[in-house]
Image (tube, grey):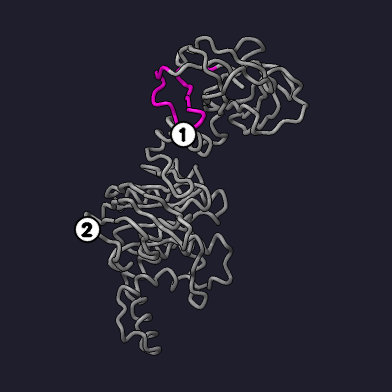
Amino acid sequence: MPKIDFKGISKTFGTNTVIRRFNATVEDGEFLVLLGPSGCGKSTLLRMIAGLAEISGGEMLFDGKLANDWTPKQRGVAFVFQSYALYPHMTVRSNIAFPLVMDHFRKWHHIPIVNTIHRWQVMKRPEVKAAVDKMAEQLELTPLLDRRPGSLSGGQRQRVALARSLVRDPSLYLLDEPLSNLDAKLRTQMRSEITTLHQKVKKTFVYVTHDQVEAMTMATRIVVMNGGTIQQIGTPDEIYDEPANTFVAKFVGAPPMNLLPVQLNGKDLTAGEGITWTHSGQKPVGETKAIFGIRPEKLELRPEKAGRLPARVAVIERLGAETIMGCRLGLADAGDSISTEDLVFVRMPGHPGLSHGDACSLDYADEDACWFDKPTGQRIASRHDDTRVAAIA
């Protein structure tokens, strides 16, 4: 179970750099999730860990030993690909058992007849059959064991690919968006299965996804990436409650954190002193230099004029146990054309009894606010920073 250290890792394809000076540590036994949008370099990094892609610069250490040039076999990893990569001529049972068969592979097994006999003998072993049957039962594949991949649905193929990688006992599990082709119900079930597997085997997992729900529910730590660089490393709670910059604030959360530009005026932002909230569409006097952030569930919906921010309901999403409401600041007609980018979202339990176009107001506790530097997008270090704020744009 290796501890992995990345020291200035970079990856280039020709003149295109996809990973820049990646520095991080994957502790022994943790569940690390690489989270980011498509094209941010997370899958490329996973392939470098597995030894499937060369490292252009920097060092990767397994338990303190330089592993840049190690073969995949030397690293002892199990890799679940985003694409199924199943063998079409083999049954589901043979596909799942393939890594166990290869553990006993020798050079002379390349001979066709010898290869067939060898695979048949290994497949007949009680421990191999038991391992395959157990994994098939966990992933609801038992009725499909004698079928071939061509007769399976996309979700079924993904489960076979997942079972094939998990059936081994490797030192490191690498998973590249393994749940992307599953339906919603099975995706939820598989998140629980993979989390339970991690707790049971107590080995290192590195998991790639662009789905924040998977990251938040499964990870012990998350690395948020964008443009080949690390945006933030932290626990799920740290990533959600204390985003390092506006990218993390917008990427993590559904709906994401509300981000509103504000002016400076010499008042204490942490106490909410002297903050004058102007109507949507009005431009503040002076240069806008800060951004106010608040999570939707931290906003309180109040009657008109009872809260700090006058607003009007523009969007209502009823989800049963909770309701998400999109409000436009100010009291302008909610029928006017407005982008969802300009709405402030509120998450609340039940249903507030408001309709589209109703006037209301929004309020918040000062300690729930986040503040970001406008030019850089970086979070102001502390909620008690002495930066001064005046009015929302």
Q: Secondary structure at mark 1?
A: loop
For residue 303, side relative to residue 264 (left or right): right
Q: Is residue 351 above or below residue 137?
A: above
Q: At 47% across and 60% down in the image, what residue appears?
A: 15
Reading the chain from its start, which is encountered first: label 2 or label 1?
A: 2
Return the residue nearer the eye: 89 or 210: 210
Name the image quarter holding residue 49.
bottom left
Name the image quarter holding residue 345.
top right
Crowd band around label 1 with a 10 angstrom C-alpha radius: few (<14), some (14–19), many (20+) = some
- In the rendered image, residue 8, in percent from the top left (x then y), is placed at 33, 51
Callout 2 amino acid: Lys
Residue 341 is a magenta residue: no
* Residue 245 disc label: 1
Q: Secondary structure at mark 2?
A: strand
- In the rendered image, residue 184, in percent from the top left (x then y), is placed at 56, 49
Crowd band around label 2 with a 10 angstrom C-alpha radius: few (<14), some (14–19), many (20+) = few
Spatial CA distance of label 2 from label 1 is 34 Å
Q: At 31% across and 86% down in the image, what residue appears?
A: 108
Is any atom of residue 1 visible in this view?
A: no
* Magenta span: 364-386
For residue 36, side relative to residue 129 (left or right): right
Callout 1 amino acid: Asn
- In the rendered image, residue 259, in percent from the top left (x then y), is placed at 56, 28
* Residue 65 disc label: 2
